Image (spheres, helix red, strand yellow):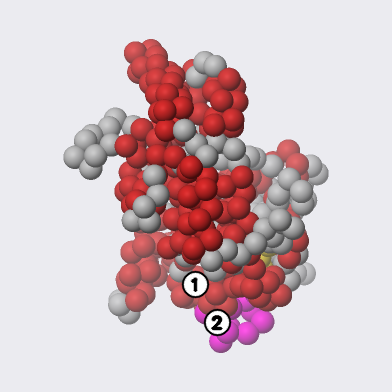
Amino acid sequence: MRFWVERRLVIHVGAQKCASSSLQASLRLVAQASKGALGFCFLNPAQLRNADQALQQDRDTAFGYIDRVLSAESSSQVVVSHEMLGNRPALVGSIAERALDRHGFDHVVISGYSRLQSSYHVSAFCQWFFRDRKKLHDDVKVLADRNLSWKKFTPLERSLFALSLVGRDRNWFGNYQRFLGSIKSLGDSVTVVSSHIPTRSLPYSLLSHFLSSTGLSLELDDLSSFDVRKNLSFNQVLIHAMSSYLSALLPCQQSFFPGPHEGNRWLFRVCDRLSGADELLSEFQVLFPPRLQQFLVGHLDCRAYSSNKQYCDLMSVDFNYFKPSDQASLLTESELIGLAGDVARSRNDEDIEQFNRKIENACMLSMRAEIVSS
């Protein structure tokens, strides 16, 4: 007697800076341990870009790569994943339809995670933007255009200030409206699930949540043994030193520093060689009190309040993850500029210059030690 087994495809869409690397690493381990019960594929970003372009141009080649991936999977439960999909709802909807029509899947789940916008931006700065010269120079220009002395602020403060004045927040509500719209014609065969990633104040097991929320069933005894924290953080001393140094370079000047998505392992080894990092960090906190950053973060949280509430209502997400602090307030442009002006007047140019030289020298020595050791 043969039993019918439902085939389920989960399309994990990220998003970026929402624990995607950690979850993907965990799912690889789970797939290996599942003895065929779960298939996992980390999708090729270049192939996804090609598929998206071909889909927009209605070319016959749009699904060549997707067809090869799905036809290679024989498990009854399959996860395909890439955070790039978080910005491509039309492509995701088409993949879901293709999986149902051509590849024998009975149900598709689109799964994505979100993050409070201010936290998202700070995390992106500490991973990528602190070494992105164009982004750093754009942030400097925002302050200079408003007659603010940009050197009085940390690069992260400048980045948050620029986002507050001229940037746009990630709109999770609009994002998931588009996902739901892309699968509207597919009925109950496709569902969309989402949640805010775990935080220190509201923790949970990301892997366990992903498996249960997507309806994946695996007979594994201890899921906690598969939990991976993939994205380690760079030392704050390195982040400030590199971003301050790069911000001051002229466009015609070159630097050997790795850019975004480059040289991560090398930079982590440099962090390991940093001496006196704790002392430097203490000096940093005295020189740059967190008051301005707290005001800017609070402003961003209040600005995104309405759309975040709509997202939580739409996707049944706990709004406590997105709730602004009691001290947070929405500021006008003149209030933001006035606040920045007050902070600038309270800081000493000479003290900042001496500290930046000290912290840059410490990082340069660590970088030189790493270079000559290899």
- Amino acid carrying label 2: it is Gly
Q: Quadrant of the N terminus?
A: bottom right
Give the magenta part as a residue range.
179-191
Return the residue nearer the eye: 350 or 245.
Answer: 350
> In x, y percent, where is residue 151?
40, 39
> In x, y percent, where is residue 103?
52, 71
Task: Reply above or below: 361 against 36.
Answer: above
The residue sitting at 32% across, 37% down in the picture is 248
Task: Reply above or below: 263 against 197.
Answer: above
Crowding at mark 2 (Cα within 10 Å: few <14, some 14-19, many 20+) = few
The residue sitting at 36% across, 52% down in the picture is 147
Going by the image, does 296 lie left or right of 225? left
- Amino acid carrying label 1: it is Pro
Return the residue nearer the eye: 353 or 261.
Answer: 353
For mark 1, what is the residue?
89
For mark 2, what is the residue?
181
Q: Is residue 84 magenta?
A: no
